[in-house]
Protein backbone atom coordinates (compact mmCIF):
# COMPACT_ATOMS: atom_id res chain seq x y z
CA UNK A 1 0.00 0.00 0.00
CA UNK A 2 1.30 3.43 -0.88
CA UNK A 3 0.54 6.55 1.14
CA UNK A 4 0.23 10.18 0.10
CA UNK A 5 -0.31 13.49 1.81
CA UNK A 6 -3.90 14.72 1.38
CA UNK A 7 -3.49 18.23 -0.05
CA UNK A 8 -1.96 20.62 2.46
CA UNK A 9 -3.29 18.72 5.48
CA UNK A 10 -1.09 16.66 7.76
CA UNK A 11 -3.10 13.54 6.87
CA UNK A 12 -1.03 10.82 5.23
CA UNK A 13 -3.60 8.58 3.57
CA UNK A 14 -3.48 5.15 1.96
CA UNK A 15 -3.93 5.21 -1.82
CA UNK A 16 -7.03 3.05 -1.35
CA UNK A 17 -9.52 4.22 1.26
CA UNK A 18 -12.47 2.37 2.80
CA UNK A 19 -15.89 3.67 1.74
CA UNK A 20 -18.28 2.77 4.52
CA UNK A 21 -21.62 3.44 2.83
CA UNK A 22 -22.13 -0.32 2.21
CA UNK A 23 -22.02 -0.78 6.01
CA UNK A 24 -25.34 1.09 6.02
CA UNK A 25 -26.69 -1.59 3.62
CA UNK A 26 -27.18 0.94 0.83
CA UNK A 27 -26.15 -1.58 -1.83
CA UNK A 28 -27.93 -4.55 -0.20
CA UNK A 29 -28.00 -6.08 3.25
CA UNK A 30 -24.66 -6.32 5.04
CA UNK A 31 -24.65 -7.99 8.42
CA UNK A 32 -22.83 -6.69 11.45
CA UNK A 33 -20.13 -9.36 11.55
CA UNK A 34 -19.34 -8.94 7.84
CA UNK A 35 -19.03 -5.20 8.41
CA UNK A 36 -16.64 -5.70 11.31
CA UNK A 37 -14.57 -8.25 9.37
CA UNK A 38 -14.35 -5.87 6.38
CA UNK A 39 -13.05 -3.03 8.56
CA UNK A 40 -10.53 -5.23 10.41
CA UNK A 41 -9.29 -6.73 7.12
CA UNK A 42 -8.84 -3.23 5.69
CA UNK A 43 -6.77 -2.16 8.69
CA UNK A 44 -4.61 -5.29 8.39
CA UNK A 45 -4.08 -4.51 4.69
CA UNK A 46 -2.78 -1.02 5.47
CA UNK A 47 -5.91 0.99 4.60
CA UNK A 48 -5.92 3.88 7.06
CA UNK A 49 -8.70 6.19 5.85
CA UNK A 50 -12.37 5.41 6.50
CA UNK A 51 -15.02 7.59 4.86
CA UNK A 52 -18.53 7.55 6.30
CA UNK A 53 -21.55 9.83 6.86
CA UNK A 54 -24.60 10.04 9.13
CA UNK A 55 -26.70 9.66 5.96
CA UNK A 56 -25.49 6.13 5.10
CA UNK A 57 -28.16 3.75 6.35
CA UNK A 58 -29.61 6.52 8.54
CA UNK A 59 -26.60 6.45 10.94
CA UNK A 60 -26.16 2.65 10.73
CA UNK A 61 -22.85 2.89 8.84
CA UNK A 62 -21.32 5.25 11.40
CA UNK A 63 -22.51 3.15 14.33
CA UNK A 64 -21.13 -0.05 12.78
CA UNK A 65 -17.85 1.56 11.86
CA UNK A 66 -17.53 2.79 15.43
CA UNK A 67 -18.14 -0.71 16.80
CA UNK A 68 -15.71 -2.24 14.29
CA UNK A 69 -12.98 0.19 15.35
CA UNK A 70 -13.60 -0.27 19.07
CA UNK A 71 -10.32 -1.12 20.79
CA UNK A 72 -8.16 -0.25 17.78
CA UNK A 73 -5.43 2.32 18.52
CA UNK A 74 -6.92 5.68 17.51
CA UNK A 75 -3.69 6.89 15.92
CA UNK A 76 -3.61 3.92 13.52
CA UNK A 77 -6.53 5.14 11.36
CA UNK A 78 -8.14 8.33 10.06
CA UNK A 79 -11.86 9.05 10.22
CA UNK A 80 -13.66 11.18 7.65
CA UNK A 81 -17.36 11.84 8.11
CA UNK A 82 -19.84 14.45 6.93
CA UNK A 83 -22.47 16.96 7.96
CA UNK A 84 -25.48 18.44 6.19
CA UNK A 85 -27.18 15.42 4.62
CA UNK A 86 -29.39 13.16 6.73
CA UNK A 87 -31.78 11.57 4.22
CA UNK A 88 -32.46 11.36 0.50
CA UNK A 89 -34.15 14.76 0.70
CA UNK A 90 -33.17 15.82 4.22
CA UNK A 91 -30.50 18.54 4.23
CA UNK A 92 -29.55 20.98 6.95
CA UNK A 93 -26.40 23.05 6.53
CA UNK A 94 -27.09 25.35 9.50
CA UNK A 95 -24.35 26.04 12.05
CA UNK A 96 -26.59 24.72 14.80
CA UNK A 97 -27.08 21.37 13.05
CA UNK A 98 -23.35 21.15 12.23
CA UNK A 99 -22.47 21.21 15.92
CA UNK A 100 -25.12 18.66 16.85
CA UNK A 101 -24.18 16.44 13.92
CA UNK A 102 -20.48 16.38 14.80
CA UNK A 103 -21.29 15.66 18.45
CA UNK A 104 -23.51 12.74 17.42
CA UNK A 105 -20.90 11.40 14.99
CA UNK A 106 -18.24 11.49 17.70
CA UNK A 107 -20.48 9.38 19.93
CA UNK A 108 -21.37 6.87 17.22
CA UNK A 109 -17.76 6.56 16.12
CA UNK A 110 -16.54 6.26 19.72
CA UNK A 111 -13.89 8.94 19.44
CA UNK A 112 -13.02 12.39 20.77
CA UNK A 113 -11.97 13.85 17.41
CA UNK A 114 -12.63 13.48 13.70
CA UNK A 115 -9.76 13.77 11.21
CA UNK A 116 -11.93 15.23 8.47
CA UNK A 117 -15.49 16.54 8.40
CA UNK A 118 -17.00 17.31 5.01
CA UNK A 119 -20.12 19.24 4.04
CA UNK A 120 -22.12 16.48 2.34
CA UNK A 121 -23.45 17.05 -1.20
CA UNK A 122 -23.21 20.82 -1.18
CA UNK A 123 -25.22 21.13 -4.41
CA UNK A 124 -28.29 20.64 -2.24
CA UNK A 125 -27.48 23.72 -0.17
CA UNK A 126 -26.81 27.30 -1.13
CA UNK A 127 -23.17 28.11 -1.93
CA UNK A 128 -23.40 31.31 0.13
CA UNK A 129 -24.59 29.41 3.17
CA UNK A 130 -21.90 26.75 2.77
CA UNK A 131 -19.22 29.46 2.59
CA UNK A 132 -20.63 31.83 5.19
CA UNK A 133 -22.20 29.50 7.74
CA UNK A 134 -21.47 25.76 7.37
CA UNK A 135 -17.72 25.89 6.79
CA UNK A 136 -17.17 28.57 9.48
CA UNK A 137 -19.12 26.40 11.95
CA UNK A 138 -16.76 23.53 11.18
CA UNK A 139 -13.76 25.85 11.61
CA UNK A 140 -15.13 26.70 15.06
CA UNK A 141 -15.17 22.99 15.93
CA UNK A 142 -11.65 22.77 14.56
CA UNK A 143 -10.59 25.52 17.00
CA UNK A 144 -12.10 23.41 19.80
CA UNK A 145 -10.03 20.39 18.74
CA UNK A 146 -13.01 18.22 17.74
CA UNK A 147 -12.29 18.35 14.01
CA UNK A 148 -8.84 18.31 12.43
CA UNK A 149 -9.68 19.25 8.83
CA UNK A 150 -12.66 20.56 6.90
CA UNK A 151 -13.85 19.62 3.41
CA UNK A 152 -16.71 19.49 0.92
CA UNK A 153 -18.28 16.72 -1.15
CA UNK A 154 -20.68 16.67 -4.06
CA UNK A 155 -21.21 15.81 -7.70
CA UNK A 156 -21.05 19.03 -9.83
CA UNK A 157 -17.35 19.80 -10.15
CA UNK A 158 -17.92 23.46 -11.19
CA UNK A 159 -19.69 24.06 -7.87
CA UNK A 160 -17.00 22.28 -5.85
CA UNK A 161 -14.37 24.34 -7.69
CA UNK A 162 -16.31 27.55 -7.06
CA UNK A 163 -16.56 26.99 -3.30
CA UNK A 164 -12.89 25.93 -3.01
CA UNK A 165 -11.93 29.18 -4.72
CA UNK A 166 -14.13 31.36 -2.53
CA UNK A 167 -12.93 30.09 0.82
CA UNK A 168 -10.35 27.84 2.40
CA UNK A 169 -11.36 24.21 1.95
CA UNK A 170 -8.89 21.52 3.03
CA UNK A 171 -10.30 18.69 0.92
CA UNK A 172 -12.81 17.98 -1.81
CA UNK A 173 -14.44 14.60 -2.43
CA UNK A 174 -15.63 14.02 -5.99
CA UNK A 175 -17.36 10.80 -6.97
CA UNK A 176 -17.96 8.78 -10.16
CA UNK A 177 -15.84 11.21 -12.19
CA UNK A 178 -12.62 9.36 -12.63
CA UNK A 179 -13.84 6.01 -13.87
CA UNK A 180 -13.72 3.89 -17.00
CA UNK A 181 -16.56 5.96 -18.47
CA UNK A 182 -16.01 9.41 -16.95
CA UNK A 183 -12.79 11.45 -16.74
CA UNK A 184 -14.09 14.89 -15.81
CA UNK A 185 -12.25 15.09 -12.49
CA UNK A 186 -8.92 15.21 -14.36
CA UNK A 187 -9.78 18.67 -15.69
CA UNK A 188 -10.20 20.02 -12.14
CA UNK A 189 -7.25 18.72 -10.14
CA UNK A 190 -4.93 21.62 -11.06
CA UNK A 191 -7.62 24.05 -9.96
CA UNK A 192 -7.99 22.30 -6.59
CA UNK A 193 -4.22 22.17 -6.17
CA UNK A 194 -4.04 25.93 -6.82
CA UNK A 195 -6.72 26.42 -4.15
CA UNK A 196 -4.66 24.36 -1.70
CA UNK A 197 -7.41 21.73 -1.60
CA UNK A 198 -6.61 18.01 -1.43
CA UNK A 199 -8.59 15.71 -3.73
CA UNK A 200 -10.38 12.51 -2.76
CA UNK A 201 -11.54 10.38 -5.71
CA UNK A 202 -14.59 8.35 -4.66
CA UNK A 203 -16.70 5.61 -6.23
CA UNK A 204 -14.23 4.03 -8.69
CA UNK A 205 -16.84 1.38 -9.53
CA UNK A 206 -19.37 4.10 -10.45
CA UNK A 207 -21.52 3.18 -7.42
CA UNK A 208 -21.72 -0.45 -8.49
CA UNK A 209 -22.39 0.16 -12.21
CA UNK A 210 -18.90 -1.06 -13.12
CA UNK A 211 -19.36 -4.48 -11.47
CA UNK A 212 -20.80 -7.82 -12.59
CA UNK A 213 -23.73 -7.34 -10.18
CA UNK A 214 -24.51 -3.97 -11.74
CA UNK A 215 -25.95 -0.73 -10.41
CA UNK A 216 -28.47 -0.62 -7.55
CA UNK A 217 -32.02 0.49 -8.34
CA UNK A 218 -31.41 4.02 -7.01
CA UNK A 219 -28.45 4.66 -9.36
CA UNK A 220 -28.95 8.01 -11.16
CA UNK A 221 -27.23 6.96 -14.43
CA UNK A 222 -29.26 6.78 -17.65
CA UNK A 223 -30.50 3.46 -19.03
CA UNK A 224 -28.01 3.85 -21.88
CA UNK A 225 -25.10 4.36 -19.47
CA UNK A 226 -26.06 1.37 -17.35
CA UNK A 227 -26.58 -0.82 -20.44
CA UNK A 228 -23.09 0.10 -21.68
CA UNK A 229 -21.62 -0.78 -18.29
CA UNK A 230 -23.42 -4.14 -18.38
CA UNK A 231 -22.00 -4.74 -21.88
CA UNK A 232 -18.53 -3.92 -20.57
CA UNK A 233 -19.03 -6.46 -17.75
CA UNK A 234 -19.95 -9.12 -20.36
CA UNK A 235 -16.91 -8.21 -22.42
CA UNK A 236 -14.59 -8.62 -19.41
CA UNK A 237 -16.19 -11.90 -18.42
CA UNK A 238 -15.77 -13.27 -21.96
CA UNK A 239 -12.09 -12.31 -21.72
CA UNK A 240 -11.76 -14.29 -18.45
CA UNK A 241 -11.48 -11.09 -16.45
CA UNK A 242 -13.71 -8.91 -14.31
CA UNK A 243 -14.92 -5.35 -14.88
CA UNK A 244 -14.55 -4.30 -11.22
CA UNK A 245 -10.88 -5.27 -11.31
CA UNK A 246 -10.22 -3.15 -14.36
CA UNK A 247 -12.31 -0.26 -13.01
CA UNK A 248 -10.46 -0.15 -9.71
CA UNK A 249 -7.02 -0.45 -11.29
CA UNK A 250 -7.90 2.38 -13.65
CA UNK A 251 -9.43 4.72 -11.08
CA UNK A 252 -6.59 4.56 -8.54
CA UNK A 253 -4.42 6.18 -11.21
CA UNK A 254 -6.52 9.38 -11.04
CA UNK A 255 -4.02 12.21 -11.55
CA UNK A 256 -3.87 14.67 -8.68
CA UNK A 257 -5.96 12.61 -6.26
CA UNK A 258 -4.36 11.53 -2.99
CA UNK A 259 -6.64 8.54 -2.47
CA UNK A 260 -9.46 6.56 -4.07
CA UNK A 261 -12.40 5.55 -1.88
CA UNK A 262 -14.03 2.25 -2.77
CA UNK A 263 -17.15 1.07 -1.00
CA UNK A 264 -16.70 -2.32 0.58
CA UNK A 265 -18.99 -4.41 2.73
CA UNK A 266 -17.07 -7.67 3.10
CA UNK A 267 -13.58 -8.88 3.97
CA UNK A 268 -13.43 -10.78 0.70
CA UNK A 269 -14.02 -7.59 -1.33
CA UNK A 270 -11.35 -5.76 0.66
CA UNK A 271 -8.81 -8.56 0.05
CA UNK A 272 -9.65 -8.68 -3.66
CA UNK A 273 -9.37 -4.92 -4.08
CA UNK A 274 -6.10 -4.59 -2.19
CA UNK A 275 -4.67 -7.53 -4.14
CA UNK A 276 -5.53 -5.82 -7.42
CA UNK A 277 -3.54 -2.73 -6.60
CA UNK A 278 -0.28 -4.62 -6.97
CA UNK A 279 -1.21 -6.12 -10.36
CA UNK A 280 -0.54 -4.40 -13.69
CA UNK A 281 -3.63 -3.27 -15.58
CA UNK A 282 -4.52 -5.26 -18.73
CA UNK A 283 -3.98 -2.48 -21.31
CA UNK A 284 -5.50 -4.45 -24.17
CA UNK A 285 -8.69 -5.18 -22.25
CA UNK A 286 -8.77 -1.55 -21.07
CA UNK A 287 -8.74 -0.35 -24.70
CA UNK A 288 -11.64 -2.67 -25.58
CA UNK A 289 -13.68 -1.60 -22.57
CA UNK A 290 -13.02 2.08 -23.31
CA UNK A 291 -14.30 1.53 -26.86
CA UNK A 292 -17.43 -0.12 -25.46
CA UNK A 293 -18.03 2.81 -23.10
CA UNK A 294 -17.09 5.55 -25.59
CA UNK A 295 -20.72 6.43 -26.50
CA UNK A 296 -21.40 7.33 -22.86
CA UNK A 297 -18.01 8.91 -22.03
CA UNK A 298 -18.44 11.76 -19.53
CA UNK A 299 -22.21 11.37 -19.63
CA UNK A 300 -23.15 12.17 -16.07
CA UNK A 301 -26.41 13.17 -14.48
CA UNK A 302 -27.72 16.24 -12.72
CA UNK A 303 -27.55 16.43 -8.95
CA UNK A 304 -28.82 19.10 -6.59
CA UNK A 305 -30.80 22.25 -6.94
CA UNK A 306 -30.02 24.99 -9.39
CA UNK A 307 -32.02 27.80 -7.82
CA UNK A 308 -29.86 30.13 -5.79
CA UNK A 309 -26.65 29.00 -7.41
CA UNK A 310 -24.59 31.68 -9.14
CA UNK A 311 -24.76 31.49 -12.95
CA UNK A 312 -21.05 30.79 -13.28
CA UNK A 313 -21.30 27.56 -11.37
CA UNK A 314 -24.24 26.08 -13.25
CA UNK A 315 -22.97 23.06 -15.14
P1 LIG B 1 -18.16 2.34 -5.45
O1 LIG B 1 -17.96 2.78 -6.84
O2 LIG B 1 -16.98 2.31 -4.54
O3 LIG B 1 -18.87 0.90 -5.51
C1 LIG B 1 -19.27 0.25 -4.35
C2 LIG B 1 -20.02 -1.03 -4.74
O4 LIG B 1 -19.10 -1.93 -5.39
C3 LIG B 1 -20.54 -1.78 -3.51
O5 LIG B 1 -21.74 -2.45 -3.87
C4 LIG B 1 -19.44 -2.80 -3.25
O6 LIG B 1 -19.94 -3.91 -2.55
C5 LIG B 1 -19.03 -3.15 -4.67
N1 LIG B 1 -17.65 -3.66 -4.76
C6 LIG B 1 -16.54 -3.23 -4.11
N2 LIG B 1 -15.48 -3.97 -4.48
C7 LIG B 1 -15.93 -4.86 -5.41
C8 LIG B 1 -15.32 -5.89 -6.15
N3 LIG B 1 -14.01 -6.14 -6.04
N4 LIG B 1 -16.06 -6.62 -7.01
C9 LIG B 1 -17.38 -6.38 -7.15
N5 LIG B 1 -18.03 -5.42 -6.45
C10 LIG B 1 -17.32 -4.68 -5.59
O7 LIG B 1 -19.33 3.26 -4.83
P2 LIG B 1 -19.58 3.92 -3.41
O8 LIG B 1 -19.49 2.93 -2.31
O9 LIG B 1 -20.83 4.72 -3.54
O10 LIG B 1 -18.39 4.96 -3.26
C11 LIG B 1 -17.28 4.72 -2.42
C12 LIG B 1 -17.34 5.56 -1.17
O11 LIG B 1 -17.10 6.92 -1.49
C13 LIG B 1 -18.69 5.53 -0.43
O12 LIG B 1 -18.81 4.38 0.37
C14 LIG B 1 -18.57 6.83 0.34
O13 LIG B 1 -17.74 6.63 1.47
C15 LIG B 1 -17.88 7.75 -0.65
N6 LIG B 1 -18.84 8.52 -1.48
C16 LIG B 1 -19.20 9.77 -1.06
C17 LIG B 1 -20.12 10.50 -1.80
C18 LIG B 1 -20.51 11.88 -1.32
O14 LIG B 1 -19.94 12.37 -0.37
N7 LIG B 1 -21.45 12.51 -1.95
C19 LIG B 1 -20.69 9.97 -2.95
C20 LIG B 1 -20.29 8.71 -3.37
C21 LIG B 1 -19.35 8.00 -2.63
Image: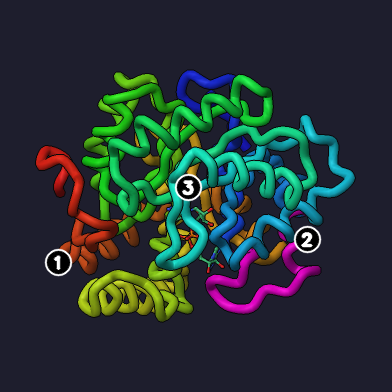
Q: Is residue 50 visible?
A: yes
> Mark 2 or mark 3, which has the lower sequence index?
2
Pair 1/3: label in front: 1
Q: Position of residue 299 (x, y in %)?
A: 19, 61
**Image disc number at residue 295:** 1
Give whichever of 109, 220 is nearer the camera: 109
User: In 3D space, how far apart are the residues under numbered discs 2 and 3 (Cα atoms)?
Assistant: 30 Å
Q: Do the residues under discs 2 and 3 have CB atoms within 8 angstroms?
A: no
Q: Residue at horizontal 53%, vertical 42%?
A: 96
**Magenta region: which residues?**
22-40
> Mark 1 or mark 2, which has the lower sequence index?
2
**Above or below, 195 relative to 242:** above
Q: Residue at horizontal 85%, vertical 42%?
A: 72
In the orientation shown, which residue stands out farthest toward the left?
A: 311
Question: Mark 3 — residue?
Answer: 280
For this view, does 230 lie left or right of residue 109?
Answer: left
Pair 2/3: label in front: 2
**Image disc number at residue 36:** 2
Amino acid sequence: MRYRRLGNTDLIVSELAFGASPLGSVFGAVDEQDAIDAVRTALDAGINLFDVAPYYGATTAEARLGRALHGVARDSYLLATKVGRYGAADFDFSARRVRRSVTESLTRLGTDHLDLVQCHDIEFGSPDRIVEETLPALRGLQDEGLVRHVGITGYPLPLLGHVAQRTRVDTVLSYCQYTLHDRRLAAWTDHFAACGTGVVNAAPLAMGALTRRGAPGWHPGSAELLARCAAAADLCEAAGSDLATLALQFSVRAPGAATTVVGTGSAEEVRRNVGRLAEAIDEELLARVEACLAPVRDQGWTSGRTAGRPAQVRS
